[in-house]
Amino acid sequence: MRAVVLERQGGPEALVVHELPSPTAGEGQVLVSVRAAGVNFLEVLVRQGMYPQPPELPWVPGLEVAGLTESGRRVLGLVRATGGGYAEVAAVDEDWLFDLPPDASFEEGAAFLMAFLTAWLPLTRQAPVRHGMRLLVTAAAGAVGSAAVQVGRALGAEVVAAAGSEEKLALPRSLGAVEAVTYDAIEELGQVDVVLDPVGGPLLAGALRLLRPLGAAVAVGYAGGPWEPVSPQQLVGRNVGLHGFYLGRLMQREPAIVRDAARDLLRLWAQGIVRPVVGSTYPLDQAGEAHRLIEERRSTGKVVLVL
Ligand SMILES: NC(=O)c1ccc[n+]([C@@H]2O[C@H](COP(=O)([O-])OP(=O)(O)OC[C@H]3O[C@@H](n4cnc5c(N)ncnc54)[C@H](OP(=O)(O)O)[C@@H]3O)[C@@H](O)[C@H]2O)c1
Protein backbone atom coordinates (compact mmCIF):
# COMPACT_ATOMS: atom_id res chain seq x y z
CA MET A 1 0.00 0.00 0.00
CA ARG A 2 1.04 3.61 -0.44
CA ALA A 3 1.65 5.62 2.71
CA VAL A 4 3.21 8.94 3.64
CA VAL A 5 6.29 8.45 5.79
CA LEU A 6 8.09 11.01 7.95
CA GLU A 7 11.67 9.74 8.17
CA ARG A 8 13.25 12.77 9.79
CA GLN A 9 12.14 16.06 11.24
CA GLY A 10 12.14 18.89 8.75
CA GLY A 11 10.15 20.97 6.30
CA PRO A 12 7.06 19.79 4.40
CA GLU A 13 9.37 17.98 1.92
CA ALA A 14 10.25 15.53 4.71
CA LEU A 15 6.87 13.83 4.04
CA VAL A 16 7.48 11.22 1.34
CA VAL A 17 5.16 8.59 -0.17
CA HIS A 18 6.53 5.03 0.12
CA GLU A 19 5.25 1.57 -0.70
CA LEU A 20 4.81 -0.21 2.64
CA PRO A 21 3.33 -3.56 3.68
CA SER A 22 -0.35 -3.16 4.65
CA PRO A 23 -0.92 -3.20 8.41
CA THR A 24 -2.46 -6.26 10.01
CA ALA A 25 -5.41 -5.84 12.36
CA GLY A 26 -4.39 -6.39 15.98
CA GLU A 27 -6.81 -7.63 18.62
CA GLY A 28 -9.96 -5.48 18.63
CA GLN A 29 -8.90 -3.70 15.44
CA VAL A 30 -10.50 -3.40 12.02
CA LEU A 31 -8.75 -2.67 8.73
CA VAL A 32 -10.09 0.43 7.02
CA SER A 33 -9.58 1.17 3.35
CA VAL A 34 -8.85 4.87 3.79
CA ARG A 35 -10.69 7.29 1.49
CA ALA A 36 -9.80 10.45 3.40
CA ALA A 37 -7.39 11.33 6.21
CA GLY A 38 -7.59 14.44 8.38
CA VAL A 39 -4.46 16.57 8.69
CA ASN A 40 -3.96 17.81 12.22
CA PHE A 41 -1.79 20.58 13.60
CA LEU A 42 -0.16 17.99 15.88
CA GLU A 43 1.37 16.25 12.84
CA VAL A 44 2.81 19.56 11.68
CA LEU A 45 4.37 20.05 15.13
CA VAL A 46 5.81 16.49 15.10
CA ARG A 47 7.37 17.09 11.68
CA GLN A 48 8.82 20.39 12.86
CA GLY A 49 10.27 18.73 15.97
CA MET A 50 8.08 20.94 18.17
CA TYR A 51 5.83 18.28 19.72
CA PRO A 52 6.65 17.50 23.35
CA GLN A 53 6.02 13.73 23.19
CA PRO A 54 7.09 12.86 19.63
CA PRO A 55 6.51 9.39 18.17
CA GLU A 56 9.49 7.34 17.04
CA LEU A 57 10.56 7.93 13.42
CA PRO A 58 10.01 6.72 10.77
CA TRP A 59 6.35 7.52 11.35
CA VAL A 60 3.24 7.38 9.20
CA PRO A 61 1.31 10.45 10.40
CA GLY A 62 -2.47 10.62 10.60
CA LEU A 63 -4.75 10.25 13.59
CA GLU A 64 -8.18 10.26 11.96
CA VAL A 65 -9.55 8.63 8.85
CA ALA A 66 -12.76 7.87 7.00
CA GLY A 67 -13.23 4.96 4.66
CA LEU A 68 -14.66 1.50 4.19
CA THR A 69 -14.20 -1.61 6.32
CA GLU A 70 -13.75 -5.01 4.68
CA SER A 71 -17.47 -5.63 5.27
CA GLY A 72 -18.33 -2.42 3.37
CA ARG A 73 -19.28 -0.30 6.39
CA ARG A 74 -18.78 3.46 5.82
CA VAL A 75 -16.85 4.61 8.87
CA LEU A 76 -14.90 7.38 10.47
CA GLY A 77 -12.37 6.64 13.16
CA LEU A 78 -9.56 7.76 15.39
CA VAL A 79 -6.24 6.04 14.82
CA ARG A 80 -3.98 5.32 17.81
CA ALA A 81 -1.32 7.89 18.72
CA THR A 82 1.12 5.58 16.94
CA GLY A 83 -0.35 7.05 13.73
CA GLY A 84 -0.95 5.41 10.37
CA GLY A 85 -3.76 7.53 8.88
CA TYR A 86 -1.93 8.97 5.85
CA ALA A 87 -2.09 5.56 4.13
CA GLU A 88 -4.26 3.46 1.85
CA VAL A 89 -5.05 1.06 4.69
CA ALA A 90 -5.18 1.79 8.43
CA ALA A 91 -5.75 -0.52 11.40
CA VAL A 92 -8.28 1.20 13.68
CA ASP A 93 -9.49 0.08 17.11
CA GLU A 94 -13.10 -1.04 16.80
CA ASP A 95 -13.82 1.05 19.91
CA TRP A 96 -12.86 4.20 18.05
CA LEU A 97 -14.74 3.47 14.86
CA PHE A 98 -18.14 5.07 14.18
CA ASP A 99 -20.67 4.97 11.35
CA LEU A 100 -20.45 7.85 8.89
CA PRO A 101 -23.80 9.68 8.63
CA PRO A 102 -25.57 8.55 5.44
CA ASP A 103 -25.31 11.83 3.50
CA ALA A 104 -21.76 12.65 4.64
CA SER A 105 -18.71 12.46 2.40
CA PHE A 106 -15.51 10.67 3.41
CA GLU A 107 -13.73 14.06 3.41
CA GLU A 108 -16.21 15.37 5.95
CA GLY A 109 -15.82 12.17 7.98
CA ALA A 110 -12.06 12.68 8.22
CA ALA A 111 -12.64 16.30 9.28
CA PHE A 112 -15.00 15.62 12.14
CA LEU A 113 -13.86 13.81 15.25
CA MET A 114 -10.68 15.57 16.40
CA ALA A 115 -12.00 19.07 15.80
CA PHE A 116 -15.49 18.57 17.20
CA LEU A 117 -14.43 16.54 20.25
CA THR A 118 -11.86 19.23 21.06
CA ALA A 119 -14.63 21.81 20.99
CA TRP A 120 -17.46 19.77 22.55
CA LEU A 121 -15.77 18.18 25.56
CA PRO A 122 -14.37 21.39 27.08
CA LEU A 123 -17.54 23.36 26.31
CA THR A 124 -19.80 20.74 27.89
CA ARG A 125 -17.60 19.37 30.69
CA GLN A 126 -15.00 21.92 31.77
CA ALA A 127 -16.50 25.33 31.06
CA PRO A 128 -20.10 24.34 30.30
CA VAL A 129 -21.76 26.74 27.92
CA ARG A 130 -25.41 27.35 28.66
CA HIS A 131 -28.15 29.15 26.79
CA GLY A 132 -27.51 32.89 26.53
CA MET A 133 -23.85 32.78 27.53
CA ARG A 134 -21.31 34.64 25.43
CA LEU A 135 -18.55 32.42 24.04
CA LEU A 136 -15.33 33.69 22.45
CA VAL A 137 -13.60 31.36 20.00
CA THR A 138 -10.10 32.26 18.77
CA ALA A 139 -8.58 30.93 15.52
CA ALA A 140 -12.27 30.74 14.70
CA ALA A 141 -11.70 29.94 11.02
CA GLY A 142 -9.48 26.94 11.85
CA ALA A 143 -10.48 23.31 12.22
CA VAL A 144 -11.14 23.35 15.97
CA GLY A 145 -12.31 26.98 15.79
CA SER A 146 -14.94 26.41 13.10
CA ALA A 147 -16.18 23.41 15.10
CA ALA A 148 -16.28 25.45 18.33
CA VAL A 149 -18.37 28.21 16.73
CA GLN A 150 -20.94 25.60 15.71
CA VAL A 151 -20.82 23.78 19.05
CA GLY A 152 -21.29 27.07 20.91
CA ARG A 153 -24.33 27.87 18.80
CA ALA A 154 -25.72 24.36 19.28
CA LEU A 155 -25.40 24.85 23.06
CA GLY A 156 -27.35 28.12 22.84
CA ALA A 157 -24.45 30.54 23.24
CA GLU A 158 -24.00 33.88 21.59
CA VAL A 159 -20.70 33.22 19.81
CA VAL A 160 -18.10 35.88 19.10
CA ALA A 161 -15.03 35.08 17.08
CA ALA A 162 -11.47 36.24 16.55
CA ALA A 163 -9.00 35.24 13.85
CA GLY A 164 -5.65 36.26 12.42
CA SER A 165 -6.82 38.15 9.33
CA GLU A 166 -9.84 39.95 7.86
CA GLU A 167 -10.25 37.27 5.15
CA LYS A 168 -10.67 34.59 7.80
CA LEU A 169 -13.60 36.34 9.50
CA ALA A 170 -16.12 35.36 6.80
CA LEU A 171 -16.15 31.69 7.84
CA PRO A 172 -17.07 32.12 11.54
CA ARG A 173 -19.65 34.74 10.51
CA SER A 174 -21.18 32.27 8.05
CA LEU A 175 -21.34 29.69 10.85
CA GLY A 176 -23.32 32.04 13.06
CA ALA A 177 -20.82 34.14 15.03
CA VAL A 178 -22.58 37.41 15.85
CA GLU A 179 -19.31 39.37 15.86
CA ALA A 180 -15.93 38.57 14.37
CA VAL A 181 -12.75 40.63 14.69
CA THR A 182 -9.03 40.28 14.10
CA TYR A 183 -6.87 39.74 17.20
CA ASP A 184 -5.75 43.36 17.38
CA ALA A 185 -9.40 44.37 17.93
CA ILE A 186 -10.26 41.61 20.40
CA GLU A 187 -10.97 44.07 23.24
CA GLU A 188 -13.86 45.45 21.16
CA LEU A 189 -15.73 42.20 21.74
CA GLY A 190 -16.30 43.20 25.37
CA GLN A 191 -16.85 40.71 28.15
CA VAL A 192 -17.51 37.02 27.61
CA ASP A 193 -18.39 34.05 29.84
CA VAL A 194 -16.23 31.41 28.18
CA VAL A 195 -13.16 31.43 25.93
CA LEU A 196 -12.00 28.48 23.82
CA ASP A 197 -8.45 29.14 22.66
CA PRO A 198 -6.40 27.03 20.22
CA VAL A 199 -3.78 29.79 19.75
CA GLY A 200 -1.93 30.19 23.08
CA GLY A 201 1.04 32.58 23.06
CA PRO A 202 0.20 36.02 24.39
CA LEU A 203 -3.37 35.72 23.03
CA LEU A 204 -4.62 33.49 25.84
CA ALA A 205 -3.46 35.87 28.56
CA GLY A 206 -5.20 38.72 26.68
CA ALA A 207 -8.40 36.71 26.28
CA LEU A 208 -8.45 35.95 30.03
CA ARG A 209 -8.84 39.67 30.64
CA LEU A 210 -12.14 39.57 28.70
CA LEU A 211 -13.73 37.07 31.07
CA ARG A 212 -16.63 38.15 33.23
CA PRO A 213 -16.48 37.18 36.91
CA LEU A 214 -17.21 33.42 37.22
CA GLY A 215 -16.18 32.93 33.60
CA ALA A 216 -13.59 30.43 32.38
CA ALA A 217 -11.16 29.90 29.54
CA VAL A 218 -10.03 26.61 28.06
CA ALA A 219 -6.58 26.33 26.48
CA VAL A 220 -6.57 23.65 23.79
CA GLY A 221 -3.49 24.49 21.74
CA TYR A 222 -0.46 26.67 21.20
CA ALA A 223 -0.50 27.18 17.42
CA GLY A 224 0.65 30.77 17.98
CA GLY A 225 3.55 29.93 20.32
CA PRO A 226 4.21 28.70 23.86
CA TRP A 227 1.77 29.71 26.57
CA GLU A 228 2.72 32.63 28.78
CA PRO A 229 2.70 31.68 32.47
CA VAL A 230 -0.60 32.49 34.23
CA SER A 231 -0.50 32.88 37.99
CA PRO A 232 -3.37 31.81 40.28
CA GLN A 233 -3.27 35.40 41.49
CA GLN A 234 -4.57 36.59 38.11
CA LEU A 235 -7.40 34.05 38.31
CA VAL A 236 -8.34 34.52 41.97
CA GLY A 237 -8.28 38.29 41.74
CA ARG A 238 -10.70 38.26 38.82
CA ASN A 239 -12.91 35.32 39.90
CA VAL A 240 -12.16 33.42 36.70
CA GLY A 241 -10.92 29.94 35.82
CA LEU A 242 -8.49 28.42 33.36
CA HIS A 243 -8.73 24.82 32.10
CA GLY A 244 -6.52 22.75 29.85
CA PHE A 245 -7.83 20.14 27.44
CA TYR A 246 -5.90 17.35 25.72
CA LEU A 247 -7.97 14.85 23.75
CA GLY A 248 -5.28 12.18 23.30
CA ARG A 249 -4.76 11.73 27.05
CA LEU A 250 -8.52 11.82 27.71
CA MET A 251 -9.02 9.00 25.17
CA GLN A 252 -6.54 6.93 27.19
CA ARG A 253 -7.82 7.84 30.65
CA GLU A 254 -11.58 8.29 30.13
CA PRO A 255 -12.42 6.50 26.87
CA ALA A 256 -16.11 6.09 27.74
CA ILE A 257 -16.55 9.86 28.16
CA VAL A 258 -14.92 10.53 24.79
CA ARG A 259 -16.92 7.82 23.01
CA ASP A 260 -20.20 9.15 24.47
CA ALA A 261 -19.24 12.62 23.29
CA ALA A 262 -18.49 11.30 19.79
CA ARG A 263 -21.93 9.68 19.66
CA ASP A 264 -23.62 12.90 20.87
CA LEU A 265 -21.78 14.86 18.18
CA LEU A 266 -22.64 12.36 15.44
CA ARG A 267 -26.31 12.74 16.41
CA LEU A 268 -26.01 16.54 16.11
CA TRP A 269 -24.40 16.09 12.71
CA ALA A 270 -27.13 13.69 11.55
CA GLN A 271 -29.73 16.27 12.67
CA GLY A 272 -27.98 18.97 10.61
CA ILE A 273 -27.10 21.04 13.69
CA VAL A 274 -23.33 20.85 13.13
CA ARG A 275 -21.28 19.94 10.06
CA PRO A 276 -17.51 19.74 9.54
CA VAL A 277 -15.93 22.38 7.34
CA VAL A 278 -13.55 20.88 4.77
CA GLY A 279 -11.43 23.85 3.75
CA SER A 280 -8.97 22.13 1.37
CA THR A 281 -8.23 18.69 0.01
CA TYR A 282 -4.97 17.26 -1.35
CA PRO A 283 -4.01 13.90 -2.83
CA LEU A 284 -1.82 11.66 -0.64
CA ASP A 285 1.38 12.50 -2.54
CA GLN A 286 0.87 16.20 -1.74
CA ALA A 287 0.77 15.75 2.03
CA GLY A 288 3.71 18.16 2.25
CA GLU A 289 1.67 20.87 0.52
CA ALA A 290 -1.20 20.23 2.95
CA HIS A 291 1.24 20.74 5.84
CA ARG A 292 2.65 23.86 4.20
CA LEU A 293 -0.83 25.41 3.99
CA ILE A 294 -1.35 24.90 7.74
CA GLU A 295 2.19 25.91 8.71
CA GLU A 296 1.93 29.13 6.69
CA ARG A 297 -1.36 29.88 8.43
CA ARG A 298 -3.28 29.93 5.14
CA SER A 299 -5.77 27.13 5.88
CA THR A 300 -9.40 27.53 6.87
CA GLY A 301 -11.57 24.72 8.17
CA LYS A 302 -10.01 21.29 8.03
CA VAL A 303 -7.32 20.17 5.61
CA VAL A 304 -7.94 16.64 4.33
CA LEU A 305 -5.95 14.15 2.24
CA VAL A 306 -8.07 12.22 -0.26
CA LEU A 307 -7.21 8.76 -1.58
N1 LIG B 1 -5.87 19.78 23.01
C1 LIG B 1 -6.25 18.93 22.08
O1 LIG B 1 -6.67 17.82 22.36
C2 LIG B 1 -6.19 19.37 20.67
C3 LIG B 1 -6.88 18.69 19.65
C4 LIG B 1 -6.83 19.20 18.34
C5 LIG B 1 -6.06 20.34 18.09
N2 LIG B 1 -5.39 20.93 19.11
C6 LIG B 1 -4.59 22.13 18.92
O2 LIG B 1 -5.45 23.19 18.61
C7 LIG B 1 -4.79 24.08 17.73
C8 LIG B 1 -5.65 24.23 16.50
O3 LIG B 1 -5.67 22.99 15.82
P1 LIG B 1 -6.41 22.88 14.44
O4 LIG B 1 -6.20 21.50 13.93
O5 LIG B 1 -7.77 23.39 14.58
O6 LIG B 1 -5.55 23.85 13.54
P2 LIG B 1 -6.09 25.08 12.70
O7 LIG B 1 -6.98 25.91 13.49
O8 LIG B 1 -6.66 24.55 11.45
O9 LIG B 1 -4.77 25.85 12.45
C9 LIG B 1 -4.19 26.57 13.49
C10 LIG B 1 -4.72 28.01 13.53
O10 LIG B 1 -3.98 28.66 14.55
C11 LIG B 1 -3.86 30.01 14.22
N3 LIG B 1 -2.47 30.45 14.41
C12 LIG B 1 -2.10 31.46 15.22
N4 LIG B 1 -0.79 31.64 15.16
C13 LIG B 1 -0.31 30.72 14.29
C14 LIG B 1 0.99 30.42 13.82
N5 LIG B 1 2.07 31.09 14.25
N6 LIG B 1 1.15 29.43 12.91
C15 LIG B 1 0.08 28.73 12.50
N7 LIG B 1 -1.18 28.96 12.92
C16 LIG B 1 -1.37 29.96 13.82
C17 LIG B 1 -4.26 30.16 12.75
O11 LIG B 1 -5.48 30.88 12.71
P3 LIG B 1 -5.42 32.49 12.69
O12 LIG B 1 -4.59 32.87 11.53
O13 LIG B 1 -6.84 32.85 12.57
O14 LIG B 1 -4.81 32.89 14.00
C18 LIG B 1 -4.48 28.76 12.27
O15 LIG B 1 -5.56 28.68 11.39
C19 LIG B 1 -3.41 23.50 17.47
O16 LIG B 1 -2.51 24.09 18.36
C20 LIG B 1 -3.59 22.04 17.78
O17 LIG B 1 -2.38 21.42 18.16
C21 LIG B 1 -5.44 20.47 20.37
Image (cartoon, grey):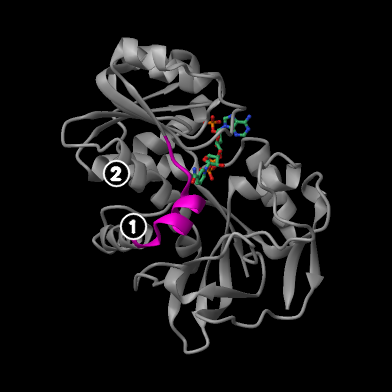
**Count of numbered circles in the view:** 2
Give me the C-alpha separation between circle 2 and circle 1: 10 Å
At a point 33% along the width and 14% down the height, the residue shown is: 236
Compare marks 2 and 1 and give the one earlier in the sequence.
2
Quick one: quadrant of the N terminus?
A: bottom right
At a point 45% along the width and 61% down the height, the residue shown is: 108
User: Is label 2 in contact with label 1 (beta carbons under 8 Å)?
Assistant: yes
Figure check: 45 above or below 26: above
Local secondary structure at mark 2: helix
Residue that lies at the very extreme toward the left in this rendered image: 131
Side of 119 relative to 13 (left or right): left
Quick one: quadrant of the C terminus?
A: bottom right
Residue hosting label 1: 257
Q: Nearer the viewer, residue 260 or 105?
A: 260
Side of 233 relative to 59 (left or right): left
Say which quarter of the image contains residue 151. top left
Specify start and end residues of the magenta stretch as a single range: 244-256
Figure check: 200 above or below 294: above
Residue hosting label 2: 125
Image location (x, y in percent) of residue 305: 62, 61
Could you classify mark 2 by the number of other residues whose Cα lies within 10 Å: few (under 14), some (14-19), or many (20 or more)? Answer: few
Residue flagged by tag 2: what amino acid is it? Answer: Arg
Residue flagged by tag 1: what amino acid is it? Answer: Ile
> Quadrant location of ligand 1?
top right
Magenta highlight on residue 250: yes
Magenta highlight on residue 246: yes
Local secondary structure at mark 1: helix
At a point 44% along the width and 41% down the height, the residue shown is: 245
Image location (x, y in percent) of residue 306: 60, 65
Q: Is residue 175 visible?
A: no
